[in-house]
Amino acid sequence: MRPHLPLLAVAMSVALCCTAQTPRNARDAVTAQQKFDRVFRYLNAYYVDTPDPGSLAETAVRAILSELDPHSAYLTAEEMRSARERIEGSFDGIGIEFGVIADTPVVIRPLPGGPAEQAGIRASDRIVTIDSCRVAGAVPTDIPSLLRGRRGTRVRIETLRHGADKPVCFTVIRDRIPLRTVDAAYEAAPGIGYIHVGRFGRTTTEEFHAAYERLGSPRALILDLRGNGGGLLGEALALAEFFLSRGNRLLSVEGRAIPETIYEAKKGGTLTDGPLAVLIDEGSASASEIVAGALQDWDRGVIIGRPSFGKGLVQRQFTLSDGSALRLTIARYHTPSGRIIQRPYTEGERERYLHDFMRRNTLPPDSLTTGAPRFRTLRTGRPVFGGGGILPDLLTAPDTAATTPWLSRLVRNGALEAFLLGIVDRQRGELLRLYPDAGCFAAKFAVDGTMLDDLAAFGATRGLPRSVAEESRSAPRLRRLVAIELARLLYGTEGAIRIANNTDTMVYKRSIKLLEAWNTEGKKLIGYEK
């Protein structure tokens, strides 16, 4: 069948890409659609083997989209289910995090208050069977489908526990498991709160408000959007509104078939004044760029970090009959000052688009503004630049700690994760006694040379030959990775973020210093003092 796929893809591409609304183009679109239908009928009627229509259609759809912008996409029914869970902020399951040690799933932690914890499952329990299905040696990605199921249904789990003479069995009743979008919230320094929003889902606004109140409504705030790839537009607008005044423009959207739509703050925000630092990086995209762009255009806070990804295309989702979906770009986002968030691209050249993104983040700061469209902020009139993405007010250098081929392989083949899982499995009680919480771990834990040597030796047993030169070059980055991932295994995502921030002098600690000197330093950066 493969020799026929290009013809099929081209036919569908012609049929679906002729979207102009002139009478001639409308006739061309009908002709192209008829051509595709005829090709498909010929394939079904005369091809030497029996074709798989579903597979042909999916291949053709993907080929069509590869010729369009870099963000139009096709999602299978399974991908749609996963995406829906992330957006809705929950799924039905038992509520555990697990890793794999020696081909056996091991519970890293039962989620607090979740069904697994209530049933008595503990960290370090080894899962032997799920509903009588042996899972030792199973593909790790297959295990969640065995644990998840409709809320209220039962699943029987057999485990091996340290110190137990025989397997321990549990019957767990599945329930709704929340997926949090606010990954961390804590006091970064006296009077300075820190909130990390990992993505924008259905519950982000509610989670953010709760986190802010839990911090005691601090006088200054660090809003961390690094690594936030986007999500729901409404939640992003609601977060921006938290910091802005009623009537402030938040965003405008326009497209060929979409009239210009302007979004404004519907009510006055809770924190419309006072020191604010917004952290972004190359992983900040779409909805997070909308927030950062609105706050920058209104001179509401200082944007710190690296240039954002530059995804400013609006996708509309069209659900198909088999549960799959087409996400088709229909419009572009503009910040309140009129800047286009989307980076330039050439249709059909997705690899070049990615290459340009990677290259862009190695360029010197001056080159990022050379030739870029210049705009003015809406309060102080200071210059900001378009051309794609959000350029921080305070641009920081990329992390230059060495990443060697040896370190990359250590991470990619799972050796680092397996090594740390083994440590936590053997020493969890002792580690938690020494470091009862993430704050204590951040203040006291240090990765010593012995641990790095043991890790390198472990990697060698998994087919990664040791290299003294590469180990030495990688040591600073590896120490940080080990501490971050160990904290994640012991305390969850917030623990990992605390450790990452504790060792981040370029962005996180710099933002604290800026907020502490807001009247003399922060305001100057956003044009309030010359």
Image (cartoon, grey):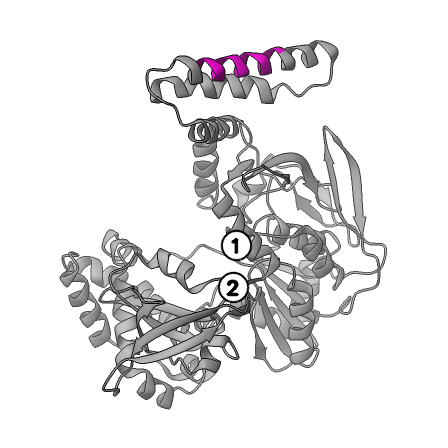
Viewer-proximal residue among 460 and 55: 55
Q: What numbered label is drawn on residue 526? A: none
Name the side, left or right, on which 227 lies relative to 393. Answer: left
Q: Quadrant of residue 260?
A: top right
Image spot of residue 167 (x, y percent): 27, 80
- Mark 1 — residue? 281
Is 39 included in the stretch rendered in magenta?
Answer: yes
Image spot of residue 328 (x, y percent): 61, 35
Residue type at numbered disc 1:
Asp
Looking at the image, tell me whether mark 1 or mark 2 is earlier in sequence order: 1
Residue at 66% over, 36% down:
373
Q: CA distance from mark 1 to mark 2?
A: 10 Å
Type of secondary structure dominating the magenta stretch: helix
- Cβ atoms at labels 1 and 2 below 8 Å apart: yes
Name the side, left or right, on which 80 lies relative to 465. Answer: right
In this picture, which residue range is highlighted in magenta? 31-42
Residue at 52% over, 70% down:
509
State whether residue 241 appears in this view. yes
Local SS, label 2: loop
Is 146 included in the stretch rendered in magenta?
Answer: no
Name the side, left or right, on which 379 lies relative to 6. Answer: right
Local SS, label 1: loop
Viewer-proximal residue among 207 and 43: 43
Q: Is residue 529 above or below residue 82?
A: below
Residue at 53% over, 58% down:
226
Residue at 63% over, 71% down:
515
Q: Residues within 10 Å of mark 2 (few under 14, many from 20)?
A: many
Q: Is residue 365 above or below residue 433?
A: above
- Mark 2 — residue? 507
Which residue sits furthest bottom? 433
Q: Quadrant of residue 395?
A: bottom right
Q: Is residue 317 above or below residue 188?
A: above
